[in-house]
Image (tube, rainbow, N blue to C red):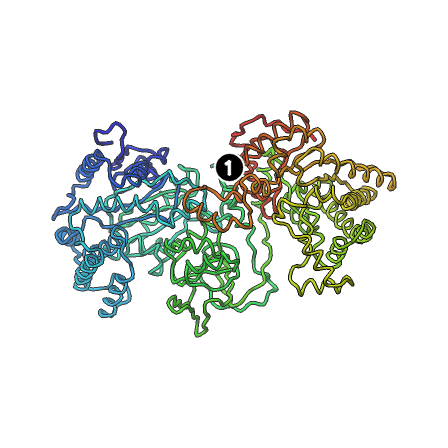
Amino acid sequence: MSGTYSQPSVYFFGQGRADGTATMKDVLGGKGAGLAEMTNLGIPVPPGFTIAASLCITYLETQQFPPWLRSQVETSLQRLEAATNRHFGGSERPLLVSVRSGAPVSMPGMMETILNLGLNDRTVAGLGKESGNEQFAWDSYRRFVQMYSAVVLDLDKGPFEKMLEAAKHRAGVERDIDLPTAEFKALVKQFKAHAEKASGKPFPDDPMEQLWGAIAAVFESWHTRRAIDYRKLHNLPDSMGTAVNIVTMVYGNLGEDSGTGVAFTRDPSTGERQLYGEYLINAQGEDVVSGTRHVEPIARLKEQMPAAYAELDRIARILERHFRDVQDMEFTIERGKLYMLQTRRGQRSGQAAVRIACEMVDEGLIDQDEAVARIPPNDLNQLLHPMINQSSKVDLLTSGLPASPGAASGKVSFSADEAEALAKKGKAIILVRRETSPEDFHGMVAAKGILTARGGMTSHAAVVARGIGKPCVASAQKLTVDEEHGCLSVNGRELKAGDWITIDGGSGKVYAGKAELQAPVLSAEFTRLMEWADKKRHLKVRVNADTPADAHKGRDFGAEGIGLCRTEHMFFEGDRLVAMREMILAQDLEGRKRALAKLLPMQRGDFESIFRAMEGYPVTIRLLDPPLHEFLPHAREEVEEMAKALGKPAEEVQRVVDSMREANPMLGLRGCRLGITYPEITQMQARAIFEAACAVALRKGRVQPEVMIPLVANVVEFRKQALIIREVAEQVFREKQITVPYLLGTMIELPRAALTADEIAREAQFFSFGTNDLTQTTWGLSRDDAGRFLPYYLENGIVEDDPFQVLDQAGVGKLIEMAASLGRKTRADLKLGICGEHGGEPRSVTFCDSLGMNYVSCSPYRVPIARLAAAQSSLSERGTVDRTRATV
């Protein structure tokens, strides 16, 4: 460590010793910590130094470097010169460096890198003389000017690429590296002239000026759109910042005895235990990940450079055993000698993560608890991706590399911006690119899947797609993408923007048209991991299910009951909707009862099927909640159709429709207010529930109904509805000559209910927190209208998360905590659960567990995610209150 500042900011590594270790990720970033650890392990790493990540935020806030940083960097440069016997800016044996980012949490491809820094008209001659390869030296110089112009000077890449293509055309070559020295020299001159014209200042020749410009650019890349989008997607804080790594250059583009590549210690798509990756001979790292050249699988390196491959394989095993996790490594071979440039935790698909965790337990590298703890719950989404139905008629278009698993259908889009815009309108999109770049990240997130014409299994498209759980096919054969004119072609077939295609990221196949998709088959490893998770968690996980099909799906995914059955969803179709509308239009009690009598057997049959599907697990049924106008048509033509179906005059129906309109329906006549105003509705629903429960019980089935009264704000409301329900229950039990145990509770979805929970708990046996409406009423905003301003709030940091996706623990969470505490003070055995959309969001699950809730409930496909999140919460022991749960 160097400099006079009291807190070290620059950390050196080299010659078998490093100032840092792998435990210092928060300081050195993941890349810097990995370089330091490999150095300490005796693994061949080019020497260098790391500038601490904390200085990134300081620089971004002040737009200047602390004065003491310059002396620390200069001291470290001197150490680097001594370690390499080179001179920074020297004409003989010049010291050249790479400048690379490295956040405490891996953000692959999101920030910037500059290679070959230190080259100018003087040092390029020294590099050519030392290497004996003038063409290599000028190729490196061309690369540096091109990369520096894009990253540091923030110039458009397009003109540089066009000049390069023109040079290759003049020389009659296809690959950059085959250009003659004279063309490289001409390109450097052209590039620098263009950079000066476009930026308004000469291209910097002073290596120190280059270095400080690069350091600033890496810091600035923390605030690029793609980096911000990535952090939002993965719930990473903006306050981390990125470290800057300055590392001695080693060259993979020195000739046929040199190369560069990316390797994983296991297959990141499938989890198979084998060295996996890609490389290029006579290339630099950017060539591998950019997709501009067709890469070779790592297995071929064993044939081309057996000694280098054996050394790489040996180091891969050392690193995986040392870190006890899959490693993502970058390497360069310079004239036969292997250098490691990076090791970090390897990003992997959800399928691979589960397999790797299970196999590492079997290998003794980790235990079951660590296997459960290390898999991000949302990664399980990828295992639940649909597959192409084998019976579906498909039209094979082409095939490529299976870069990220899962199948997806969507309309073709050639622009990340367009893909995002169309996705916001609810369109299913497949983003199609020649190759993706970091600037495409937002479009990749929005798309259902990604298809590229270039790039390998470790290309930007592949790595990002696996990280965000999107299907991806890369390097599709004979695929030509014309992004400018919005079309693609394969073997003479042409598709345009807006045409449907289907990709299968597991097989690499691409189909024209919209294929039929089906649910995936879960692996034995998935079942095994979930069994381990279930042993660790305290929190039960239920499913939100309104139909028997949803109930069965929830049970398939391990749900332990239904936390929310929305009875209104049973009324929105066919004869049910007609009967419901007849009830609403009835002029008197008898008319309403006649209509409700038609609905009774329909509801009873639904409940009976759901009880049977749950096989004795508890089923929470919410009584009718939405305002009645939601069941009525609004367009004139639809009103006339309804009037005809009901045999009523259209004018009469229109008057009823108009009378039902409310200024604010969300806060109007709905929930328990409906049941109090029209008690016959509550009577019918209660009878349907208890008749269904008795029917199941009489056939020796197990059943646990829980009746939930919605939108209670006052204990008197609950009491009135509860009296009706209990009276109906007793009537049905007498009629059926059987008694079924049941619970009676309420949904806490209004702030007043939370504030008076102690009063309500005198009557209610359970609380289910309806966090969708509780969020709306706490924030004072409508979920349907929030889209007009909430994206702006998120982009500008006014709120960190969408409160409808991630539970607002500071606001809504305080109300929930208060209600839970007040409720259990009154009733010690009060059952607590959550049934809003937050029930399947991992951070919200952890919060619910910390409050000692009994269960969370979520949609069927979120059940495994909630199970894993609940297990991780138990393992973390981060609960803030007594975890003792009510025994019910």
Residue 135 visible to an observer of this rendering:
no
Residue lying at 66% horizontally and 50% vertically, measured from the top left: 550
**Three-letter amino acid code of the residue under disc 1:** Ala
The C terminus lies in quadrant: top right
Outermost residue toward the bottom in this view: 492
Q: How far across and down, in percent of the image, does residue 566 sit?
A: 68, 47
Residue 280 occupies quadrant: bottom left
Image height of 787 relative to 415, above or below = above
Element marked by disc 1: helix
Percent x, y of residue 551: 68, 48
Which residue occupies the foreground of this view, 700 or 573? 573
Callout 1 crowding tier (Cα within 10 Å): few <14, some 14–19, many ≥20: some
Of residue 732 and residue 640, the one placed in the foreground of this image is 640
Q: Quadrant of the N terminus?
A: top left
Number of numbered discs on residues: 1
| Image coordinates for residue 766, horizontal then vertical, percent | 68, 34
In the rendered image, the vertical position of residue 451 relative to residue 25, given as above or below: below
Q: Is residue 268 visible?
A: yes
Left or right, 576 with reference to 354: right
Please tell me whether residue 433 is drawn above or below residue 671 in the rendered image: below
Determine whether, in the image, residue 57 is placed left or right of residue 117: right
Of residues 79 and 232, the one nearer the viewer is 232
| Depicted 88 relative to depicted 415: above or below | above
**408 lies left or right of 332:** right
Q: Which residue is mark 1?
A: 373
Quarter occupied by residue 85: top left
Q: In this rendering, would 455 be left or right of 774?
A: left
Quick one: 140 or 576, which is closer to the camera?
A: 576
Question: Residue 478 in the image: x percent, y percent?
Answer: 41, 68
